[in-house]
């Protein structure tokens, strides 16, 4: 190892202790950090400058090496800062001033030199902290340690309000303080501090200066980026930019780290600054083209890929051109209301590289809503990119962002989030007040939300008929809203309109198969209609979705028990062989459905099969299969065969043609109640 390398190694070891002394002097013993106390002028050259001192109750030993450490720290800090960040208290040239102070310390025991050097370092750090807090919008005091000289809110233990602390710390790459290195080993800390304090001041100066060098900060940022610690990388690139804002690579590298964090719109701004500084910087153009591709801006992506020249490949341009074609097909399909085509083309565009385009995700959501696939639309919304509304409006334009928000409002409304849908749709209308489409969505959200709120209030007041009407008003504005359908089913169930309630729930479940409330309500209504098999099917699905739910488990057990009892009862599809037998059945108070036919006229097999199926669904109804050829007396007064008649207490209450299957089921639903 060369002498120079040895000196640098000693400097790295000693930086910790020297800065620890600085930490104790500036922060722990000075009362308020922003309060600078007057001191005796250090030299004639500093006249007219603010007078600073380092408040410390402990007197230092004459000739102490701490004076050298503090002086070298001041030189390093001052040499590394931009001109406009240098405090007025440090006269130029600072390095020669510090050297003179060291000589004076050697001649006069070091006491006065230590005080002067401490004043310079205190001013340096105070200025650096103030500048950092001013850029971050914070005036609160923060704690500094010897390891975080760069003073960034999201690095180490200096944390500004609102700063994000990552799981990994960039300080892992910096020299540790004596206290950190010892980690509780108090008996060794004094020896380590003494060894660090004995390092030559010139070596510490060079080490601290290198730590604030923008190129080294960039390299450290690159290392953090490679390790996936993007927040730390951004902080390091930010510091390099602060020192030297005229270097395009710093801005471009920061954009790459922002991309890793998903902050694409900010990354675009950083890349734009890079190409403004250096219009021929191909890598920045390539990165900007990739950003525009991901955001669905195909034309801009092609433009920057071409400006990147050798940094971009022909494949990049081809990919952007393919995206451009998919976008054209999406617009065409939407105009023609070809929802299947729109869904397919928008998904293809995302696969082509536009994985963060709000427009393409909005296309998919709109198409899925139109196809009554509401749960898929909601899942697509969850996976869509999340950008700040104002930033998105500025980047994509008002009409485009208003469309994104209007579609999102419709997805929220379909999911029952009426208040959110109302707020978002109103914001979309404010962004693009001239759009009829956006205004229509806002109006629909407002009226549907009002109807639902009104219906809920009436339902809670046990005014079920009025609640049913209120929900119907909401469905008039949003006919395919599964939530309103399920709410109306609840009101109809309370009115004993179980068949209608089942129909509402069935429609809601077609659009939202995982809608637990609708399935539970349908299962209950089918149980009231004694359709045990249908009820059991729904309860079994619910048990899979809600394992361990005691109420569902009990309802399922009850339904299975009732089904067994129904099957144990005698078959209610009875073949009549005599007139007396026929009169005996129709005379009961139970509803009887009689299929009267003559084999010679050949009743259809479909009709017999239908009646047999209905007999299983309606266990409380007697179904009679009457073959008129078995007893001639049965054929009296029957001129039109085959025919189906409904009897109750010996009286025929309705007669329909045996071939009219729809009328048969409809009449049975009404008369069996």
Image (tube, rainbow, N blue to C red):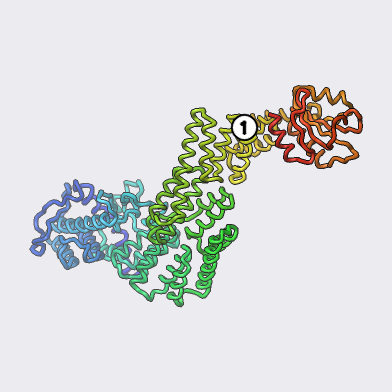
Residue 616 in view in this figure: yes
Nearer the observer, 391 or 235: 391
Residue that carries the numbered disc 1 in the rendered image: 497
Apparent side of residue 378 relative to residue 657 in the rendered image (left or right): left
Apparent side of residue 621 relative to residue 284 in the rendered image (left or right): right
Instruction: Give percent across and percent down for residue 599.
Output: 89, 38
Number of marks drawn = 1
Nearer the observer, 260 or 394: 394
Apparent side of residue 265 relative to residue 501 in the rendered image (left or right): left
Instruction: Give percent across and percent down for residue 74.
Output: 21, 61
Residue 18 in view in this figure: no
Instruction: Give percent across and percent down for residue 339.
Output: 58, 57
User: Quadrant of residue 618 in the image?
Assistant: top right
Is 643 located above or below residue 231 in the figure?
above
Nearer the observer, 181 or 410: 410
User: Which quadrant of the rendered structure holds the C terminus?
Assistant: top right
Instruction: Give percent across and percent down for residue 30.
Output: 19, 48
Nearer the observer, 79 or 594: 594
Query: In what element is the residue under mark 1?
Result: loop
Is 226 located above or below residue 531 in the figure?
below
For disc 1, the neighbor class at 10 Å (few under 14, some 14 to 19, many from 20) is some
Tell me the residue at 57%/37% (across/down). 517
Tell me the residue at 50%/35% (across/down). 455
Residue at the bottom extreme of this rendering: 310
Apparent side of residue 533 relative to residue 52 in the rendered image (left or right): right
User: Which quadrant of the rendered structure holds the N terminus?
Assistant: bottom left
């Amino acid at each position: 190892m060369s002498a120079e390398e040895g000196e640098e190694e000693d400097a790295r070891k000693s930086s910790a202790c020297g800065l620890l002394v600085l930490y104790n002097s500036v922060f722990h013993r000075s009362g308020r950090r922003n309060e600078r106390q007057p001191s005796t002028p250090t030299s004639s050259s500093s006249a007219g400058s603010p007078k600073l001192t380092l408040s410390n109750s402990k007197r230092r030993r004459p000739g102490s090496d701490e004076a050298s450490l503090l002086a070298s720290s001041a030189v390093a800090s001052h040499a590394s800062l931009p001109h406009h960040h240098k405090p007025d208290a440090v006269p130029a040239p600072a390095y020669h001033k510090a050297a003179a102070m060291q000589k004076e310390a050697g001649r006069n025991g070091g006491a006065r030199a230590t005080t002067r050097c401490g004043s310079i370092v205190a001013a340096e750090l105070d200025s650096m902290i103030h500048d950092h807090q001013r850029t971050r919008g914070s005036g609160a005091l923060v704690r500094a340690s010897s390891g975080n000289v760069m003073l960034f809110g999201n690095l180490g233990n200096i944390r500004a309000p609102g700063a994000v602390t990552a799981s990994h710390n960039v300080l892992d790459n910096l020299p540790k303080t004596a206290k950190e290195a010892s980690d509780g080993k108090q008996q060794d800390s004094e020896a380590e501090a003494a060894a660090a304090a004995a390092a030559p001041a010139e070596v510490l100066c060079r080490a601290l200066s290198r730590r604030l060098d923008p190129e080294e900060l960039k390299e450290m940022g690159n290392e953090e980026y490679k390790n996936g610690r993007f927040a730390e990388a951004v902080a390091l690139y930010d510091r390099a930019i602060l020192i030297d804002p005229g270097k395009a690579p710093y801005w471009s590298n920061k954009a790459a780290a922002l991309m890793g964090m998903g902050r694409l719109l900010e990354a675009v701004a950083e890349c734009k600054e890079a190409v403004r500084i250096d219009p021929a910087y191909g890598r920045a153009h390539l990165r900007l083209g990739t950003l525009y591709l991901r955001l669905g801006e195909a034309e801009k992506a092609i433009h920057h890929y071409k400006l990147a020249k050798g940094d971009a490949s022909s494949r990049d341009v081809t990919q952007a051109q393919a995206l451009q074609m998919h976008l054209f097909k999406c617009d065409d399909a939407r105009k023609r209301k070809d929802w299947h085509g729109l869904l397919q083309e928008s998904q293809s565009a995302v696969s082509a590289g536009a994985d963060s385009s709000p427009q393409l995700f909005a296309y998919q959501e709109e198409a899925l809503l139109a196809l009554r696939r509401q749960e898929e639309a909601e899942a697509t919304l969850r996976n869509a990119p999340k950008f700040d509304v104002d930033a998105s409006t500025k980047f994509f334009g008002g009409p485009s962002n208003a469309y994104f928000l209007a579609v999102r409002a419709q997805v929220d409304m379909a999911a029952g989030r009426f208040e959110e849908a109302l707020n978002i749709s109103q914001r979309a209308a404010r962004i693009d007040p001239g759009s009829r489409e956006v205004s229509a969505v806002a109006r629909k959200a407002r009226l549907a939300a009002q109807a639902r709120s009104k219906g809920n209030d009436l339902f809670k007041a046990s005014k079920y008929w009025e609640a049913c009407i209120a929900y119907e008003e909401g469905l008039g504005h949003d006919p395919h809203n599964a939530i309103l359908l399920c709410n109306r089913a609840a009101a109809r169930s309370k009115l004993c309109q179980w068949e209608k309630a089942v129909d509402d729930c069935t429609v809601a479940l077609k659009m939202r198969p995982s809608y637990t409330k609708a399935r539970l309500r349908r299962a209950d209504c089918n149980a009231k209609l004694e359709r045990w098999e249908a009820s059991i099917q729904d309860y079994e699905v619910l048990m899979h979705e809600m394992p361990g739910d005691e109420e569902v488990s009990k309802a399922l057990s009850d339904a299975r028990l009732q089904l067994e009892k129904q099957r144990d009862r005698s078959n209610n599809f009875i073949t009549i062989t005599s007139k007396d037998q026929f009169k005996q059945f129709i005379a009961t108070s139970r509803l009887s459905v009689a299929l009267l036919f003559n084999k010679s006229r050949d009743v259809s097999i479909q009709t017999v099969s239908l009646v047999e199926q209905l007999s299983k669904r309606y266990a409380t109804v007697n179904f009679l299969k009457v073959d008129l050829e078995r007893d001639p007396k049965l054929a009296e007064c029957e001129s039109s065969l085959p025919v189906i008649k409904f009897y109750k207490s010996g009286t025929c209450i309705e007669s329909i043609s045996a071939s009219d299957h729809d009328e048969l089921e409809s009449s049975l639903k009404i008369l069996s109640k």
